[in-house]
Amino acid sequence: MFLLFDVGGTKTRVVLGDDGGIKDKAVIIPTPTDFDQCLAQIVDTARSLAQGEKITRVVGGLAGALDRDHTMLVAGSNISPWIGKPVKRLLEEALHAPVVLENDAALAGLGEAIIGAGKDYAIVGYMTISTGVGGARITNKTIDAHVFGFEPGYQIVDADGSLCTRCTKRNLEAHISGRGIEDHYGKKPEDIHDKNVWEGIACALGVGLTNTILHWSPDIMVLGGSVMKDISIERVREVVREFLHVYPEIPALERAQLGDIGGLEGALQIARTSSVS
């Protein structure tokens, strides 16, 4: 039996799975700001779900960049209390099972590449626009090799501050993420109904996507995350077409299909295929 979890900036999801798939619905926990409390809740939930059955493998996604050996988080503004904590060791000691850690967006992208919007494509680029902005490149149903992970949200889109004089950061995440939007406008994304605001966000995303497409050259870019629900994907396509001239065509741009379970589906695939023992 596998334990699968996904720690995001606002919510943590925990579920069991096996070779047959995910079992039941995920248990959703508001992500505590305290690391020890969050880890304890994951362990307690795992034991409660397992009901004494042995957990043979643990795969979890964390919102941020991991160290070279994928034992801990080294950067991640959305769950900063996790940075530098020996997550892999602590979970292995608590659950007596091998643990594999991966970036949460990379796992969501893997899920989309296997059974979601990218299932019919060999090279899938994935980007999530949620509390933060993350993503990954998936080739032939496998997360591309990397050192610290993929962080498309940290690409610089406003080097001199001319795009927005109010933003203190110059990266894409500051302009389009849920946290960035709230910092900028003083409202949560779901409370903003000004079409001009969403036009600007769609344009900023289109610029960032163009850069990402140039680096990854995917067959398809899959866009997920809670903020994406309010962004016009048609407008994003228009912006990408406007800027992307070096290729004879732009890749397919589609919304994610798996929603909140994308990362858990990706974790399940890792659990099924990982050689960790």
Image (cartoon, rainbow, N blue to C red):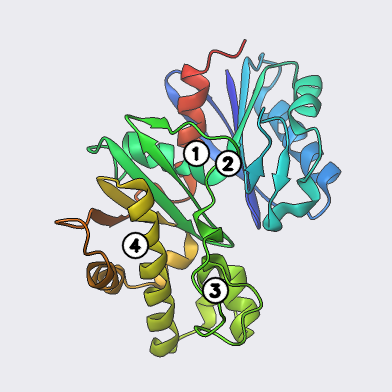
Left or right position of 260 against 28: left
Circle nearer the viewer, 1 or 4: 4
Q: Earlier in the sequence, mark 2 or mark 3?
A: 2
Q: What residue is rendered at 57% in x and 17% in y?
A: 1
For disc 1, the marked residue is 107
Label 2 SS? strand
Q: What residue is rendered at 66% in x and 31% in y?
A: 68
Q: State the image coordinates of residue 189 (x, y, percent, origin top left).
A: 53, 76
For disc 3, the marked residue is 159
Q: Is residue 5 visible?
A: no
Q: What residue is rendered at 50% in x and 71% in y?
A: 176
Q: Earlier in the sequence, mark 1 or mark 4?
A: 1
Q: Which residue type carries mark 1? A: Leu
| Residue closest to the eye, 53 or 207 | 207
Q: Earlier in the sequence, mark 2 or mark 4?
A: 2
Kindly check if marks 1 and 2 are in contact, taking CB atoms under 8 A apart as contact: yes
For disc 4, the marked residue is 210
Query: Is 243 situated above or below 93?
Result: below
| Residue closest to the eye, 250 or 127 | 250
Kindly check if marks 2 and 3 are in contact, taking CB atoms under 8 A apart as contact: no
Q: Which residue type carries mark 4? A: Thr
Q: State the image coordinates of residue 115 (x, y, percent, origin top left).
A: 32, 36
Q: Earlier in the sequence, mark 4 or mark 3?
A: 3
Q: Earlier in the sequence, mark 3 or mark 1?
A: 1
For this orientation, the residue located farthest to the top is 277
Q: Which residue type carries mark 2? A: Asn
Mark-to-mark CA distance, 2 and 4: 22 Å
Mark-to-mark CA distance, 1 and 2: 6 Å
